[in-house]
Image: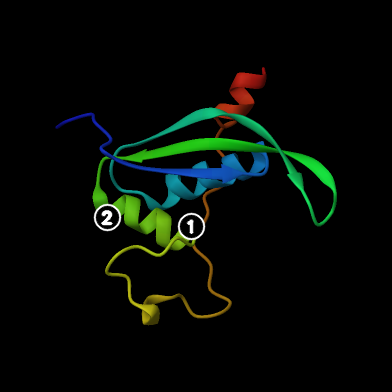
Amino acid sequence: MSAQQDFTTTLQLNSAGDMDKAEDWIRANIRGRWAVEFLGMEEKLDPGLNRRSQVLHVSFRFGLREDLDRFKRDYAGIKTPGASAGAKRPAGKTAAVAKPKNKGLFAWLRS
């Protein structure tokens, strides 16, 4: 079996906690191989609030196309080709999230 993760998406996250939540969701919902790569940080200015915030750029890689599509659709809220509008979850339903097993990549980098 190949150890490659050929299907990639990149997200901007507001905090290390958001990155940890994404990793927890992946552990609970993804069947194939996956990897997370911290790409860097950027300072952005929010013109409405006139304040600066740090944004994390993170790459999520998956070994299976269906895992990428599930992550984009169910976690990140990104519409994927072939996803129908009627395929949304009913209001009040959320994806199962596993309890954190360990700190995420970003927490490891800070230590």
Which disc is residue 100 wearing?
Answer: none
| Image height of 46 relative to 82, above or below | above
Q: Which residue occupies 41% across, 62% down? A: 73
Which disc is residue 75 wearing?
Answer: 1
Give the quadrant of the N terminus.
top left
Question: Picture coordinates of residue 92 (x, y %)?
Answer: 58, 77
User: Does the residue at mark 1 contact the one at mark 2 (Cβ under 8 Å)?
Assistant: no
In terms of secondary structure, where does tag 1 sit? helix
Q: Residues within 10 Å of mark 1 (few under 14, many from 20)?
A: some
Question: Picture coordinates of residue 55 (x, y %)?
Answer: 65, 39
Q: Residue furthest front?
A: 47
Cα distance in 3D space between marks 1 and 2: 13 Å
- Residue 2 vs residue 103: left or right? left
Q: Indicate which disc, 1 or 2, sits on the residue closer to the N terminus.
A: 2
Q: Which residue is mark 2?
A: 66
- Residue 90 vs residue 4: left or right? right
Q: How is the image coloured?
A: rainbow
Q: Amino acid at mark 2?
A: Glu
- Between 93 and 15, which is closer to the camera in this rendering? 15
Q: Which residue occupies 40% across, 65% down? A: 79
